[in-house]
Structures are given as C-alpha cells and as structure tokens.
Amino acid sequence: MAVYIDPPTWPGHGRMWSHLVSDSSFDELHAFAARLGAPPRAFERDHYDLPAERYADAVAQGAIEVGSKELLRRLTEAGLRRPKHPRR
C-alpha cells in the first residue's frame, strides 16, 4: 500500500506536471492528496495532477518516486486504471 509519483515531465497550462497514484485504493490516494493540500479538482479519473513545485513536498510526505511507465504499471496492476476512452 503506497502512493507513487512520476517526474514532472507532463506540460500543461505553462507548467510541468506529475501524476500521483495509489496502488491500493482511491481512498488512500484522496487521503494522501488532502494531507498534501492538493485540491479535489486536481483529481482526474485515477490520478492527481501535481505541479512540479509540489513534487518535493509529495516525496517528503512519503510518495515513492517512479518513472511514468512504472507508475502506469502499478496503477493497472492494482485494478485502479480508468482510461480516458474505454476500449470497445
């Protein structure tokens, strides 16, 4: 049971972003994000978008640093992946 974060390499709105996910439950993820002070609007389907300037805060609070592919693998294996466009 852990929360993972990938490097802030995703551009958007003039900033770089990381993804924050849980490998056990959305409850765990929402609780971690709340402790971090991430607003609910930062949650998108199965992850939180976290700006680069909050990356170190997330790691300091216990988020485990992994690459983007590893983050996606852990999210998928946990059964928590919610793709934008479900396969038909």
Image (cartoon, rainbow, N blue to C red):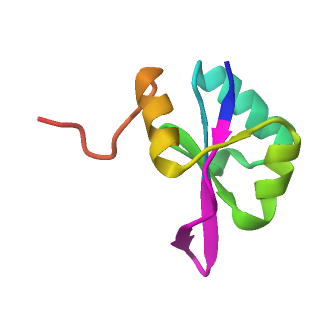
- Decide: is 1 above or below 16: above
- Residue range corresponding to the magenta coloring: 4-18
Q: Is residue 88 left or right of residue 51?
A: left
Residue 8: quarter of image:
bottom right
Q: Is residue 79 left or right of residue 53?
A: left
- Decide: is 31 above or below 34: above
Query: In the image, residue 26 lies at what x, y percent?
Result: 59, 25
**Quadrant of the snapshot with the C terminus:** top left
Please give the name of the residue rendered at 46% of the width and 26% of the height, measured from the top-left corner: 80
Total count of labels: 0
Check if residue 38 falls in the magenta segment: no
Residue 3: quarter of image:
top right
Of helix, strand and loop, which mostly describes the magenta segment?
A: strand
Query: In the image, residue 2 lies at what x, y percent?
Result: 69, 25
Check if residue 16 falls in the magenta segment: yes
Q: Hey, which residue is sitting farthest bottom in the picture?
A: 14
Inspect this view and state whether residue 37 appears.
Answer: no
Query: In the image, residue 66 lies at what x, y percent?
Result: 61, 44
* Depth order, front residue of 13/9: 9
Q: Is residue 87 left or right of residue 70?
A: left
**Quadrant of the snapshot with the N terminus:** top right
Please give the name of the residue rendered at 77% of the width and 33% of the height, measured from the top-left corner: 32
Inspect this view and state whether residue 1 appears.
Answer: yes
Query: In the image, residue 28 lies at what x, y percent?
Result: 69, 23
- Decide: is 15 above or below 2: below
Please give the name of the residue rendered at 65% of the width and 38% of the height, measured from the top-left corner: 4
Residue 47: quarter of image:
top right
